[in-house]
């Protein structure tokens, strides 16, 4: 459906044209309860996530119009379809059942008449057994030595999710093994990992949903050769495990079935952090920590399903992001996590949001009439304050910001942690309310932000944070009227890369490429060499 034809869109558009003349200072002055009313707490069992939306450029009328937009986008129906295994990915005729990955046993979710929960828990048990074996030393390399290093090979969702979880959990506890992450096809990356590892004590986790990802297979071949040169090629399989939708391809290649972990076509790569793709962190931190990650995600799933829209954190976040992008024409959004353990969160959300909602065609093949996904970017605080916060405060573009902080520190340095969090609060305050002085010192204020607080940094709170953004992306996709679960835009580049690669190998220039690409290929061929 075209959301711009709904009554709610007309109201929201009028609100957007009105609210630009109302600054945040005035909105807070008019309503002493604004901060409390526009904040949501999500209990997680063992932990809490708190979301403050009060520094966004919207009033009660605007928020009401946004919630009407959500309702008129058929969100309730589509949310039910998402959780029940309906083929919400209509261009590929697939369900998008990442929520089932963290559902408890007996949940009774079906795909094509098959209950997938039993299968999910069977694979989870397989992962648990394997991880416990590696951690205890009952599963070893070819020479009988315990594994001390794990190299995770994957790209996109097979890398960004595991990296995020690794960085978060390794900032609060010691891993059982040292983990390295290889994603890019640039051989410098895999060689850097190799330089830090001993082949006798290294396990490779190769994650490829299709078992045909060019970057992943290229790095896998380099690692296989490295292991084979030291251990003998016949022993390499003892140092490899694989995660794929096509486990038969891995067993055909010589891997034992116990070393091959299935995933499913109905889980998108960018939504796969709750699947076997995360086996590297199950090994590093143990199955109970993985269970905690899943519990946090499931707690947010339950909140998303049960909370009324006006108290529903993912619904509010998604609607506000549409407000900023589609109605106020703000082209980018910054993510600034004031936690070293969340330093890769901006990269994670970048893929999650831009690959999901960076579309210009609706579910029924029509061009959209509104702007869809913003450009998502960011980093970690307080580093951001010495890089790009200048532009956010005084630049000509208004950039909404998501600030993310943590209340408890895993160190004894509470004074430094207090200073860290104070800086985050101060940045959101300065963006919202500004400062009047001579022109070059004036901060105009009225610049929007959302602040998210985790009670602590833990597997459970990280899981909830990830699920919050997953569901926010879904809400936005409903309003945009697009399919958030395909990514056809990446396919042409893959095809052309294969053609260009063949041209690099060809003795004479190809006549297929354009003159610019042909020129670049020829220049590269004239200068390429291996050292």
Image (spheres, grey):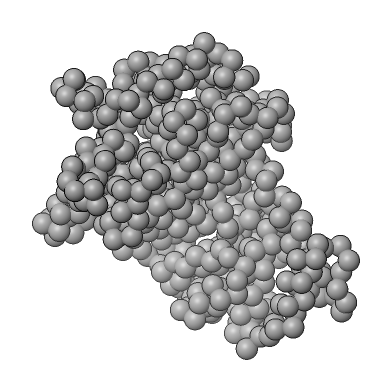
- Examine the rendered structure and indicate whether residue 94 appears above or below residue 488: above
What's the residue at 15%, 58% (across, down)? 416
Q: Nearer the viewer, residue 279 or 254?
A: 279
Image x and y of residue 147, in percent: 46, 71
- Examine the rendered structure and indicate whether residue 310 appears above or below residue 505: above
What's the residue at 71%, 65% (across, down)? 254
- Examine the rendered structure and indicate whether residue 190 appears above or below residue 322: below
- Rendering quarter of residue 94: top right
How many numbered marks, from 0 up? 0
Q: In the rendered image, is residue 281 in sight?
A: no
**Which residue in the rendered view is the most extreme toward the top?**
7
- Rendering quarter of residue 167: bottom left
**Which residue in the rendered view is the most extreme toward the bottom?**
531
Quadrant of the frame with the C terminus = bottom right
Is 159 situated left or right of 90 in this image? left
Is 490 situated left or right of 477 in this image? right
What's the residue at 71%, 55% (across, down)? 493
Image x and y of residue 377, in percent: 44, 50
**Which residue in the rendered view is the most extreme toward the left?**
415
Q: Nearer the viewer, residue 238 or 247?
A: 247
Image x and y of residue 514, in percent: 81, 62
**Which residue in the rendered view is the most extreme toward the front?**
438
Q: In the rendered image, is residue 356 in sight?
A: yes
Q: Nearer the viewer, residue 510 or 41?
A: 510
Image x and y of residue 458, in percent: 30, 48
Quadrant of the frame with the N terminus = top right
What's the residue at 67%, 46% (across, down)? 489
């Amino acid at each position: 459906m075209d959301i711009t034809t709904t009554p709610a869109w007309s109201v929201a558009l009028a609100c957007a044209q009105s609210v630009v003349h109302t600054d945040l200072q005035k909105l807070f002055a008019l309503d002493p309860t604004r901060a409390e009313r526009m904040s949501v707490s999500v209990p997680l069992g063992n932990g809490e996530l708190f979301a403050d939306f009060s520094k966004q450029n919207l009033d009660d009328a605007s928020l009401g119009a946004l919630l009407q937009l959500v309702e008129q986008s058929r969100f309730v129906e589509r949310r039910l379809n998402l959780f029940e295994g309906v083929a919400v990915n209509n261009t590929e005729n697939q369900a998008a059942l990442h929520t089932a990955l963290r559902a408890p046993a007996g949940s009774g979710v079906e795909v094509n008449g098959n209950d997938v929960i039993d299968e999910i828990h069977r694979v989870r048990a397989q992962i648990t057994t394997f991880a416990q074996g590696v951690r205890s030393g009952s599963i070893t390399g070819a020479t009988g030595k315990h594994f001390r290093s794990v190299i995770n090979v994957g790209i996109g969702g097979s890398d960004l999710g595991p990296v995020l979880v690794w960085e978060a959990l390794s900032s609060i506890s010691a891993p059982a093994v040292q983990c390295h992450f290889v994603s890019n096809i640039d051989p410098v990356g895999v060689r850097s990992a190799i330089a830090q590892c001993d082949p006798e004590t290294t396990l490779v986790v190769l994650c490829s949903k299709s078992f045909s990802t060019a970057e992943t297979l290229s790095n896998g071949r380099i690692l296989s050769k490295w292991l084979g040169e030291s251990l003998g090629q016949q022993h390499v399989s003892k140092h490899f495990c694989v995660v794929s939708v096509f486990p038969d391809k891995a067993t055909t290649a010589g891997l034992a079935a116990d070393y091959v972990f299935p995933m499913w076509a109905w889980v998108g790569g960018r939504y796969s952090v709750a699947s076997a793709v995360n086996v590297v962190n199950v090994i590093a931190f143990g199955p109970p920590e993985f269970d905690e990650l899943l519990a946090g995600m499931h707690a947010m799933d339950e909140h998303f399903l049960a909370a009324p829209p006006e108290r529903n954190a993912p619904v509010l976040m998604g609607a506000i992001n549409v407000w900023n992008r589609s109605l106020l024409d703000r082209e980018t959004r910054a993510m600034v996590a004031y936690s070293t353990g969340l330093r890769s969160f901006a990269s994670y959300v970048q893929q999650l949001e831009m690959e999901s909602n960076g579309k210009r065609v609706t579910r029924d093949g029509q061009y959209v009439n509104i702007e869809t996904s913003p450009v998502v970017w960011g980093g970690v605080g307080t580093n951001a304050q010495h890089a790009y916060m200048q532009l956010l405060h005084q630049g000509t573009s208004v950039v909404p910001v998501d600030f993310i902080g943590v209340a408890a520190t895993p160190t004894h340095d509470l004074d430094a942690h207090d200073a860290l969090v104070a800086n985050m609060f101060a940045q959101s305050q300065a963006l919202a309310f500004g400062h009047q002085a001579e022109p070059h010192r004036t901060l105009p204020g009225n610049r929007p932000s959302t602040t998210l607080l985790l009670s602590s940094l833990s597997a459970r709170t990280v899981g909830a944070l990830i699920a919050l953004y997953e569901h926010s992306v879904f809400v936005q996709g409903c309003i945009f009227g697009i399919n958030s679960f395909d990514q056809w835009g990446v396919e042409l580049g893959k095809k052309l890369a294969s053609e260009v690669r063949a041209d690099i190998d060809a003795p004479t220039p190809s006549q297929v490429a354009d003159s610019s690409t042909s020129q670049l290929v020829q220049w590269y061929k004239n200068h390429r060499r291996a050292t």
